[in-house]
């Protein structure tokens, strides 16, 4: 076994709890062909979460977590077919082993993307120099975050993460999932105005979908869509992902 493989195995012994793996995606990192690694655990309980089984710190799947060594073996066979790997969740910055896992991916010659809600700004700052792209979810106005996340102090953390990301020089996308059970048209217009004033460019509005969500949320959503919150002529400068 080569020294490189040996070092990867040692790093894989760190506690990285992998709940799932999407072997091919063209949407998780726009413009790139990637595999997406879903990490277990999240401090927030967002209304529209489509991965509610990932929010607990212990996997609910009876089969347990996927070994990181198995993921690396798969990625090694996909070199030349994939452009990179996206770490998603859950909240990936929860995991102390994330930097080591990123290093493993780098050794395979693959790019690294990260999905985050920005729950831990300091942890995000430590990871930013290691990644090529970040998808950051800004969920609401700073003082209204709890109605989406269920966690009162979450807005301050998310906006500090936004500032860190903007100052890092790392390529990124800021996106907001518009939740018709929470957001009004005025809320979304104010949020987008505030983000623009903060210098956010390429802000994307996403549609809340019932698939995978808790049954009570799907019932409350009742088929409503982004177009039920915003008029067609609202915010023409922003892209809508529906």
Image: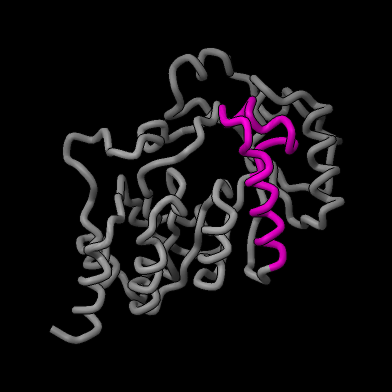
Relative to 170, residue 218 above or below: above
Q: Position of residue 223 (x, y in %)?
A: 58, 18
Magenta span of residues? 138-167
Identified at 83% across, 35% down, the residue is: 189
> Residue 208 location in percent, x, y?
59, 31
* Residue 96 among those drawn in magenta: no
The residue drawn where x is 80% and y is 42% is: 192
Q: Which quadrant: the N terminus?
A: bottom left
Give the camera-side residue of 153 and 30.
153
Q: Residue at x 33, y 56 (%)?
A: 23
Q: Is residue 209 left or right of residue 87?
A: right
Any part of residue 30 in sight: no
Task: Classify residue 40 by image quadrant.
Answer: top left
**Quadrant where the C terminus is found in the figure:** top right
145 in magenta: yes
Residue 108: x %, y % from top left: 34, 77
> What is the total number of numbered labels drawn onto the structure image?
0
* Colour mapping used in the image: one colour
Tell me if 61 is positioned left or right of 109 in this view.
left
């Amino acid at each position: 076994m080569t020294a490189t493989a040996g070092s990867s195995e040692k790093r894989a012994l760190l506690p990285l709890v992998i709940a799932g793996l999407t072997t091919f995606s063209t949407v998780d990192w726009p413009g790139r062909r990637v595999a997406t690694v879903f990490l277990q655990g999240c401090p927030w309980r967002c209304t529209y979460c489509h991965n509610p089984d990932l929010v607990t710190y212990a996997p609910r799947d009876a089969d347990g977590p996927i070994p990181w060594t198995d993921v690396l073996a798969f990625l090694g066979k996909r070199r030349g077919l994939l452009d990179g790997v996206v770490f998603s969740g859950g909240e990936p910055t929860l995991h102390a082993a994330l930097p080591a896992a990123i290093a493993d991916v780098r050794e395979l010659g693959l790019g690294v993307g990260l999905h985050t809600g920005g729950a831990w700004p300091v942890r995000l700052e430590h990871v930013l120099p290691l990644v090529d792209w970040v998808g950051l979810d800004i969920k609401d106005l700073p003082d209204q975050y709890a109605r989406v996340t269920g966690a009162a102090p979450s807005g301050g953390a998310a906006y500090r993460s936004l500032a860190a990301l903007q100052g890092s020089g790392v390529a990124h996308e800021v996106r907001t999932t518009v939740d018709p059970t929470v957001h009004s048209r005025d809320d979304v217009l104010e949020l987008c105005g505030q983000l623009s004033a903060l210098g956010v460019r390429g802000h994307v509005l996403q549609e809340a979908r019932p698939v995978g969500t808790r049954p009570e949320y799907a019932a409350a959503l009742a088929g409503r869509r982004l177009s039920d919150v915003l008029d067609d002529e609202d915010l023409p400068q922003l892209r809508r992902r529906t």
